[in-house]
Amino acid sequence: MSAADPTHATAQVVGGRLFVVSAPSGAGKTTLCAAVRRHFGDLAYSVSYTTRAPRPGEQHGRDYFFITREEFEAGIANNRWAEWARVHGNLYGTSAQWINDTLLAGKDILLDIDVQGARQMLVRFPQAITIFIRPPSMAVLEARLTGRGTDDAAARALRLANAKAEMAQQDLYRHVVVNDDLGRATRELIALLARHRSKPGPNNR
Ligand code: 5GP
């Protein structure tokens, strides 16, 4: 991973707000982000680029843009990524162009990225509203990761090690939401976004 190049830093001058959400694997972030996106129909979601293979049911352009390692590395050389990181052995990145265009159009953005990516986004966009979602305890996290059944043992061990490292960095975030109960955590997250959104919309209660 390389830190975002400060010479390409872009101030968040006008327009939309940037919400950066991170969580260790197994904290329930995907479910929570989906609920937030359903609630705020006008919230733009940044679809990341990745070299990871699609999982069953995932769609190119909706869940991720699935690209080759060569394409990804060319993107690094061309400063195409607002941030990028290696996560669980794969590369993930956010389009700088899309972020800039969307913010300039006045839209609020939800970014679901890892801790390394959040650090880089804070260099470019110090006003970003960063939110860390965490499970109530490491024991709960371990149980959720084991119960998920989508990964083999080696992948699970890697996810668990990464989860521990991410939990240790939660102080980087402005807000921490504990996902102890899905309904309660969803309400907390929605209320948090509503407080910070750039303008009240029909769905922005
Ligand atoms: P998954 O492969 O399970 O969809 O995602 C693995 C991890 O990569 C998650 O923590 C997710 O937030 C993170 N991730 C997804 N897209 C990006 C991205 O564009 N940049 C960074 N830094 N992390 C990402």
Image: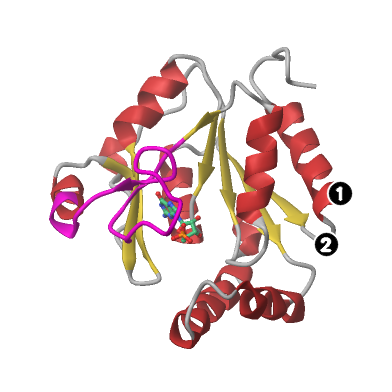
**Label 1 crowd (10 A; few <14 / some 14-19 / many >=20):** few
Closer to us: 179 or 146: 146
Q: Quadrant of the C terminus?
A: top right
Q: Where does the magenta region start and end?
A: 46-71
Q: Are marks 1 and 2 in contact (CB under 8 Å)?
A: yes
Closer to us: 60 or 161: 60
36 is within the stretch colored magenta: no
Could you say where residue 128 lies in the image, as x and y percent from the top left? Answer: 55, 37
Closer to us: 162 or 202: 202
Q: Amino acid at mark 1?
A: Arg
Residue 109 visible in the current orientation: yes
Q: Amino acid at mark 2?
A: Asp
**Label 2 crowd (10 A; few <14 / some 14-19 / many >=20):** some
Could you say where residue 174 lies in the image, as x and y percent from the top left? Answer: 67, 48
**Picture residue at 46% right of the left edge, 22% below the top:** 103
Could you say where residue 64 lies in the image, as x and y percent from the top left? Answer: 38, 46
60 is within the stretch colored magenta: yes
Please say if 144 is above or below 204. below
**Picture residue at 21% right of the left edge, 52% below the top:** 72
Residue 18 falls left or right of residue 205: left
Circle 2 residue:
180
Which mark, residue 105?
A: none
Tell me the quadrant of ligand 1: bottom left
Circle 1 residue:
184
Please say if 165 is above or below 126. below
Please say if 148 is above or below 185. below
Residue 181 falls left or right of residue 87: right
**Picture residue at 76% right of the left edge, 28% below the top:** 195
